[in-house]
Amino acid sequence: GLGLSSGDMGYAGSYKDSMQVIINAANAAGVTAILSTPIQFAVDSDMDMFAEGLAYQGVIDELITENSMLANPPVEGPDFYTVYTLAADTTILLDDQIHPNSPGYVRMADEWCNVLNGELVGSTTLNCAP
């Protein structure tokens, strides 16, 4: 859905369309959607996996910009694509080099902590330390 808008051919059912549904539901509930770039979860020898992951980041950027006027605009969460797919530290991944292992999940928690630390949720301010 990168570069597409609602009504464009190819938009319906796309990653962007699905993320917009989540943003709309969060906004309607009075909460803020935090959008993270997913780990590159499919490797196909016939595609450039880096281009695909960068497209996810581009969609997140578009959605944040396009929804900036909402009462509860979405914000950018962790960029798991960069953390895992482009990671120089492959010790945080399983042997398939796609899925996180135990230290990789700790890294994921740390990334979320960096985004959420100090945020007010209801009457509670989140407090964590990576």
Image: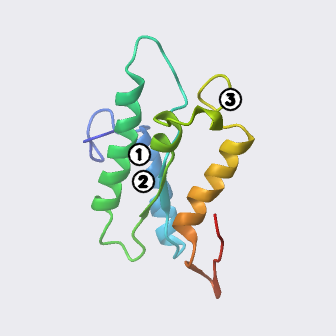
In the rendered structure, which disc, 2 or 3, sits on the residue that comes first in sequence?
2
Q: Quadrant of the C terminus?
A: bottom right
Residue at (57, 73) in percent of width and height? 117
Q: Is residue 69 above or below residue 12?
A: below
Give the residue pinned by disc 1: 17
Callout 1–callout 2 Cβ contact below 8 Å: yes
Q: Nearer the viewer, mark 1 or mark 3?
A: 3
Q: Is residue 3 above or below residue 36?
A: above
User: Which secondary structure lies at badge 2?
Assistant: helix
Give the residue pinned by disc 2: 20
In the rendered structure, which disc, 1 or 3, sits on the residue that comes first in sequence?
1
Q: Amino acid at mark 1?
A: Asp
**The disc label shown at residue 94, or none:** 3
User: Which secondary structure lies at badge 3?
Assistant: loop
Disc 2 residue crowd, few under 14, some 14–19, many 20+, Cα 10 Å: many
Residue at (74, 42) in percent of width and height? 102
Q: Residue 96 location, x and y as percent?
A: 64, 22
Residue 111 image-quadrant placement: bottom right
Q: Residue 23 location, x and y as percent?
A: 46, 60
Q: Amino acid at mark 2?
A: Gln
Disc 1 residue crowd, few under 14, some 14–19, many 20+, Cα 10 Å: some
7 displayed left or right of 42: left
Residue at (35, 37) in percent of width and height? 55
Q: Nearer the viewer, mark 2 or mark 3?
A: 3
**Which of 5 and 35 lies nearest the eye of the viewer?**
35
Q: Amino acid at mark 3?
A: Leu
Q: Quadrant of the N terminus?
A: top left
Q: Residue 72 location, x and y as percent?
A: 43, 74
Q: Residue 119 location, x and y as percent?
A: 55, 77
Q: Is residue 49 above or below residue 116?
A: above
Between the C-alphas of marks 2 and 3, the distance is: 31 Å
